[in-house]
């Protein structure tokens, strides 16, 4: 089902004009409606079948295929930017937004799944996907930072009670990037390696997206016979949209949740109580079960197809598509979420 969104971008482009907003309409209008109609599912894979389902190659194949598909989709988008007939600001905005929904809403979700796995191939695919949205530091910060400090004041990706998404975006984007540098520098020092050198992944993570778009711009400029300045602008714009969607998801998943501090600087162990959960059927199909986030944080190595629903986890009132729109209006967000947060605090004490 995840492939429906890029198909909508392609169809919207060829239909033209306002149809370029088709992917946005599906992601943020149709999916919430279908979630409302289909409801939630609390089904968990039976324990005696978890190993079998976890090792089924099909589920990995879909994520592998997405990596190659996203690269092909992006090169198609680059071709449209160079040679296509996007002529109005409305068309450009819809096309760019649709591309960002593909690379961020789904692409970063796949990168997140692959980045948690032990396989070096899957981790490589994760970094390739993150390169296409200029957010490669997420590979370090999420695995070695966020999963350690989640639901504590030390985590820039945990949103605070009464913190708007806009304030959170600034803190998480810049704080997460800064923390990734800190984590990588500490790794290098532990291994007696120079901070300024080829072993520093953060240096590579800064350079690779720039090299990628410079090469792409050079190739398409040669094909067009002139410098296509729109390509780097488009690449940066869709990247910002993509990682903004990621940060909206971070905001939603952890809003106001706190782990108890059991001694100075030490917190209780992460459990399914420490992330907002959403078992809405349709949006989970599109997002590789990302919305069963409570189990993911309690058991980060688990593959998406066997993540469990927990009744005791704090539950979102809707799937991510609807909650993303709600998060853009802080007054409404606080009205909907704050009393649910208070209820979670009462139950968790």
Image: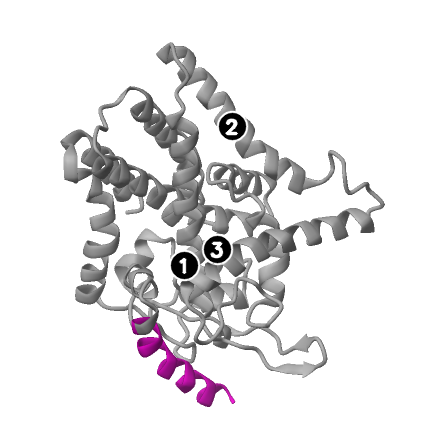
Question: Disc 3 to disc 2, how far (Cα)?
Answer: 30 Å
Task: Inspect this view and state whether residue 125 appears.
Answer: yes
Depicted 295 relative to depicted 180: above or below? below
Evaluate if marks 3 and 1 touch, with contact meaning CB atoms under 8 Å apart.
Answer: no
Q: Is residue 83 left or right of 147 when viewed as pictured?
A: left
Residue at 54% of width from left, 77% of height from top? Answer: 258
Q: Nearer the viewer, residue 4 or 151?
A: 151
What residue did someone put label 3 on?
303
Which x, y percent locates residue 63? 43, 43
Which x, y percent locates residue 323? 32, 64
**Toward which corner of the image does residue 289 lie, by quadrant?**
bottom left
Q: Nearer the viewer, residue 167 or 202?
A: 167
Question: Disc 3 to disc 1, how far (Cα)?
Answer: 23 Å
What residue did someone put label 1 on?
248
Find the residue positioned furthest to the right.
192
Q: Earlier in the sequence, mark 2 or mark 1?
A: 2
Taking the magenta stretch, the answer to whether it contains residue 343 is: yes
Please provide the residue range marked out in magenta.
332-349
């Amino acid at each position: 089902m995840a492939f429906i969104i890029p198909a909508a971008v392609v169809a919207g482009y060829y239909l033209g004009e306002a149809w370029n907003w088709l992917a946005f309409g599906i992601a943020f209008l149709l999916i919430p409606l279908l979630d409302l109609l289909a409801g939630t599912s609390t089904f968990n894979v039976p324990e005696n079948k978890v190993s079998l389902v976890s090792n089924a190659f099909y589920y990995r194949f879909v994520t592998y295929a997405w990596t190659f598909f996203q690269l092909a989709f992006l090169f198609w988008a680059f071709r449209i930017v160079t040679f296509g007939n996007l002529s109005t600001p409305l068309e450009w905005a819809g096309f760019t937004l649709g591309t960002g929904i593909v690379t961020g809403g789904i692409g970063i979700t796949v990168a997140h799944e692959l980045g948690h796995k032990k396989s070096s191939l899957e981790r490589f695919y994760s970094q390739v996907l993150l390169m296409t949205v200029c957010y490669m530091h997420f590979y370090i910060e999420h695995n070695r930072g966020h999963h350690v400090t989640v639901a504590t004041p030390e985590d820039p990706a945990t949103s605070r009670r009464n913190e708007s998404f806009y304030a959170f975006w600034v803190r998480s984007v810049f704080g997460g990037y800064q923390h990734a540098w800190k984590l990588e520098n500490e790794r290098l020092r532990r291994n007696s390696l120079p901070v300024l050198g080829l072993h520093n992944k953060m240096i590579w993570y800064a350079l690779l997206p720039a090299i990628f778009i410079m090469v792409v711009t050079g190739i398409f400029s040669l094909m067009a016979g002139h410098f296509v300045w729109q390509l780097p602008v488009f690449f940066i714009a869709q990247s910002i949209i993509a990682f903004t969607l990621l940060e909206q998801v971070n905001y939603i998943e952890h809003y106001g949740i706190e782990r108890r501090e059991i001694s100075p600087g030490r917190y209780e162990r992460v459990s399914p109580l420490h992330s907002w959960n959403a078992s809405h059927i349709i949006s989970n199909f599109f997002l590789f079960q990302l919305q069963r986030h409570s189990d993911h944080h309690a058991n980060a190595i688990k593959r998406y197809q066997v993540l469990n629903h927990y009744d005791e986890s704090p539950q979102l009132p809707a799937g991510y598509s609807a909650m993303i729109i709600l998060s853009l209006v802080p007054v409404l967000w606080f009205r909907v979420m704050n009393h649910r947060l208070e209820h979670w605090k009462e139950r968790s004490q």
